Amino acid sequence: MIWETVRLSLRSIRRNVLRSFLTLLGIVIGVAAVIAMLTIGSGTTEKVKADISKLGSNLLVVRSGRPAGPGGPGGLDQVVRPLAEKDLAALVAHLTGARAISPASQKQVRVIFGTESLTSGVTGTDSAYLDARDWKLVSGRPFSDSETRSGTGVCLIGETVRQQFFGAGDPEGEFIRVNRTSCKIIGLLEPKGYTGFGQDQDNVVLMPLHAYQRRIAGNRDIDNIYIAADDRTPTSELQPRVEDILRDIRRVTPDRESDFAIRDMTQIADAMASATTTMTGMLGAVAGVSLLVGGIGIMNIMLVSVTERTREIGIRLAIGAHEKHILIQFLVEATVLSLLGGIIGILIGLALAGLAAVTLTIPFAPSPAVILLAVGFSALIGMVFGFFPALRGARLDPIDALRHE
Amino acid sequence: MAAGAALITFDKVWKSYGQGEAKVHALAGVDLAIRRGEFVAIMGPSGSGKSTAMNIIGCLDTPTAGTYSFMGIDAGRLDRNRRAMLRNLYVGFVFQGYNLLARTTAAENVELPLIYRGVAARDRRDLAMQALSQVGLVGREHHTPAELSGGQQQRVAIARAIVTRPTLLVADEPTGNLDTARTHEIMELLTQLNTELGLTIAMVTHEADVAGYAERTIRFLDGHVASDSMKLETA
Ligand SMILES: Nc1ncnc2c1ncn2[C@@H]1O[C@H](COP(=O)(O)OP(=O)(O)O)[C@@H](O)[C@H]1O
Ligand SMILES: [Mg+2]
């Protein structure tokens, strides 16, 4: 009986292909948007999680300036003291439980080779940086201690920089211009791809801190200090030790707040992931509105269908159909219609997400649960919005219905 | 055809529409009995209440006052779904305008009442073919109404009405849309169903020669039964 009714409704949908399709557009767009958004969202989340593990979930980053929050004594008018080499030295000398401690100052700088140019993230640092960030070299060597100390013009480049300047060629030993200084390439960094937010992690140049400070920044400041905890020490334990050492060396009196901030990268990555979730949620709400519009479309077309087929309903009632038979017939038709829209929407949504996965280099992560939910939800829309028109058909008086032209 | 016990009884049946001044009495206290196996023609001028009476006879409608009993059941006081069940089990309908489902084959149209009876698909097909052969439409089962003539469409409608082996056939001007030759073919078919299957038939018509096929003629006038006469068989 139900199968019979499903066949009947498919036939009636086929009779009005164009109309059915236009009716479905709302559902198709809504479901496609939800599926695309959620699939891209979960791909991004996976990517962010992968980025976290790449960062090493045991990394602290120290920056100058007070942490966020209301200012303590001496608030706004106090000049922010940058981090300096003595702060780094104090950490290296006194901090226990760290695997690597490394300074880093960063800037977007124009990098030139021959006639080609590229704006890259240039970082001044030391040889411990690779260890602290868990980065590896594909070829070449890291800075030597003497290069770091004297600030020699040598550099390590990322994959994007290599491709831009050397194509498939070997960059080692070539000289590139960074700002107005020249540096010799001594190594190539392992490719890391994009972050979850589309930032190219391979468009980078590393050079010794002193070279960066002298030739690019023009000061002796350190923007960040990266501290990687060793395997036995959680970052939550390491953080207060770092704070104590820095407050001491920077002579922050106990009544004042620290004039530097320590950030746990795990927390940052978590925040990034939750930002993704929020974005997905908002786009989901937009998609929800279009599903509502789609549902109203279904209701409208079913009302039209019931009116058009008043005589058919009269015939069916006359020959012995019960109210429930008519109700089920139109309810099934609305559900099949809306389900069809849902399935088309799912296919389009997955195609869009697949395309996005390729362009944004994030994983394609379709979730069976989400797809199942979309199927169920579109069927539900058909049932909910098809109910009123179906009831209207079922309640018709057979005599009036038979007289209908 | 020998007539049996009363199948249908109208006891002071009224059917009124509207309120107050505008009130219309389509039926004004009709008393009437039709026995099993009878073939009754109902005649009368337009607006005299023929269709209203047929709708009540076929359990599509209920009286405003009075009692309508069908097979001894007080059908006028049954709810919609119970009357639907009665129609499905015991009544077949033939309308002036055929009332077949468009773009649906003859066989599927004939199967329709069986679907609501819960008959299995294969049995439905067999019964439908049987009914179509009874009305002389073998070979047309896959044609849609648009591909059939008026006479053929009315035959499909009759097949649909008899496929459930009903007790009563209600036909409101079944030949109203047909030419003379087709009219007589359909009337012969109905007569045959009446004599061979013992099907009780109540039929509205405007034409005396169509009424001539029935053994009894009831005339309506202004919602009353004006005359009720048996055909005088000439041996
Ligand atoms: N649904 C209705 N609403 C109002 N008046 C109706 C309705 N159905 C029938 N009537 C009136 O009842 C009377 C009898 O109608 P009907 O039984 O259709 O006559 P007939 O079939 O003999 O031509 C007519 O006056 C008609 O206008
Ligand atoms: Mg009439």
Image: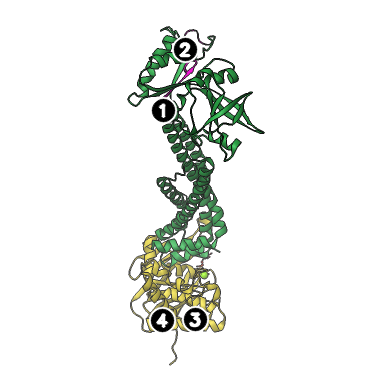
Could you confirm whether marks 2 and 1 are on the same chain?
yes
Report the chain holding disc 3. B
Q: Amino acid at mark 1?
A: Thr
Q: Amino acid at mark 3?
A: Ile
**Mark-to-mark CA distance, 2 and 1:** 27 Å
Q: Secondary structure at mark 4?
A: helix
**Mark-to-mark CA distance, 4 and 3:** 12 Å
- Residue mark closest to the camera, 2 vs 3: 2
Q: Amino acid at mark 2?
A: Lys
Is residue B41 something that shows in the picture? yes
- Is there CB contact under 8 Å for labels 4 and 2? no
The magenta span reads A58-75
Give the labeled residue for mark 3: B186
**Chief secondary structure of the magenta span?**
loop
Q: Amino acid at mark 4?
A: Asn
Could you confirm whether marks 3 and 1 are on the same chain?
no
Give the labeled residue for mark 1: A266
Q: Secondary structure at mark 2?
A: helix
Report the chain holding disc 4. B
Give the labeled residue for mark 2: A86
Compare residues B128 and A287 and report the one nearer the observer: A287
Q: Secondary structure at mark 3?
A: helix
Tell me which numbered mark, 2 or 1, is placed earlier along the sequence.
2
- Residue A384: x and y in percent read 44, 49
